Image (cartoon, coloured by chain):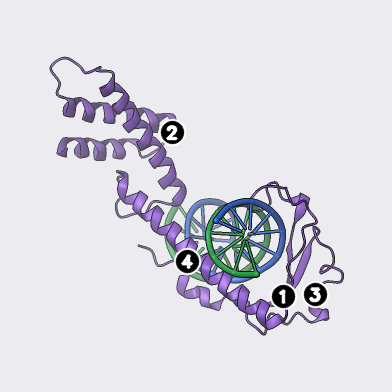
Chain colours: A purple, B blue, C green
DNA sequence: TAGGCCATCTGGTCCT
DNA sequence: AGGACCAGATGGCCTA
């Protein structure tokens, strides 16, 4: 597993109380009243703009039932706001860690070749999709009783898995097809 | 060095 | 009201 970034992330300046000095000079004029428009906060020496309202197709969670001029929450003090932001950051980190754990579980659930190389998230999702399609095809084949003469269900399933996985990978233009097939073949022989 | 991938921060919106 | 979810922004690491 690659040691990506995490340690170095400490160099990224978090939103500390110093940074959260939302004195008037650190808030772009008018943004606190302009609900549904753009807010910019001066953080770490640069302005960070956040588009809101009509600029976003789905706006976070999605609906537009509250419209672009939703009441903005106000907290009693900058300190309280800062505490809530830090707590929210921690929850978001935990949520993303859970999501990454789920990705890791998915990686381990699908057969792939380059065991030394960690699958990216998009690769994991794509392979999982193909794998599910392949398994679905097998199940449908078994349930409809379409087994080649003389083959046991296990043999037929392995062959069918190989065939389906190959088909899906070809459709997606995967360059590692031959390696996948080797892996799948050994996988099916073991089963 | 550019591009890919990722972790993290952030604020808006939805849900309970 | 507060947490969950989401997507944009940002910056670091790695590889070709």
Q: Are marks 4 and 2 on the same chain?
A: yes
**Horizontal relation, residue B2 to residue A5: left or right:** right
- Chain letter of mark 1 equals A
Residue tagged by mark 4? A94
User: N-terminal of the two: label 4 or label 3?
Assistant: 3
Quote the CA–CA distance across marks 4 and 3.
30 Å
Residue C15 coordinates in the image, percent (x, y):
42, 57
Q: Residue B16: where, in percent of width, then height?
A: 55, 56
- The residue indicated by pointer 1 is A75
| Sequence-first tag of 4 and 1 | 1
State the CA–CA distance, disc 1 to disc 2.
Answer: 53 Å
> Which of pointers 4 and 2 indicates the residue nearer the eye?
4
Which structural element holds mark 2?
Answer: loop
Mark 4 vs mark 1, CA separation in Å = 24 Å
N-terminal of the pair, mark 3 or mark 1, is 3
Q: Choose the circle earlier in sequence order: 3 or 2.
A: 3
Secondary structure of residue under mark 3: loop
Q: Quadrant of the N terminus of chain A?
A: bottom left
Residue that mark 2 sits on: A173
Number of the front mark, 4 or 3: 4
- Residue A65 picture location, percent across and down: 72, 48
């Amino acid at each position: 597993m690659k040691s990506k970034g995490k340690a170095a992330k400490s160099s990224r300046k978090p939103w500390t109380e110093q940074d959260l000095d939302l004195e008037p000079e650190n808030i772009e004029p008018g943004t606190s009243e302009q609900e549904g428009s753009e807010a910019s906060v001066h953080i770490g020496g640069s302005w960070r703009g956040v588009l809101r309202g009509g600029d976003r197709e789905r706006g976070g969670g999605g609906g537009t039932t509250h419209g672009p001029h939703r009441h903005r929450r106000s907290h009693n003090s900058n300190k309280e706001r800062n505490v809530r932001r830090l707590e929210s950051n921690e929850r978001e980190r935990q949520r993303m860690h859970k999501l990454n754990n789920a990705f890791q579980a998915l990686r381990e659930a699908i057969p792939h070749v380059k065991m030394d190389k960690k699958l990216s998230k998009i690769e994991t999702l794509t392979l999982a999709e193909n794998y599910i399609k392949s398994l679905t095809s097998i199940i449908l084949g078994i349930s409809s009783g379409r087994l080649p003469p003389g083959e046991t269900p296990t043999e037929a399933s392995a062959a069918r898995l190989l065939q389906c996985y190959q088909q899906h990978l070809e459709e997606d233009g995967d360059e590692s097809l031959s390696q996948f097939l080797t892996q799948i073949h050994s996988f099916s022989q073991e089963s």
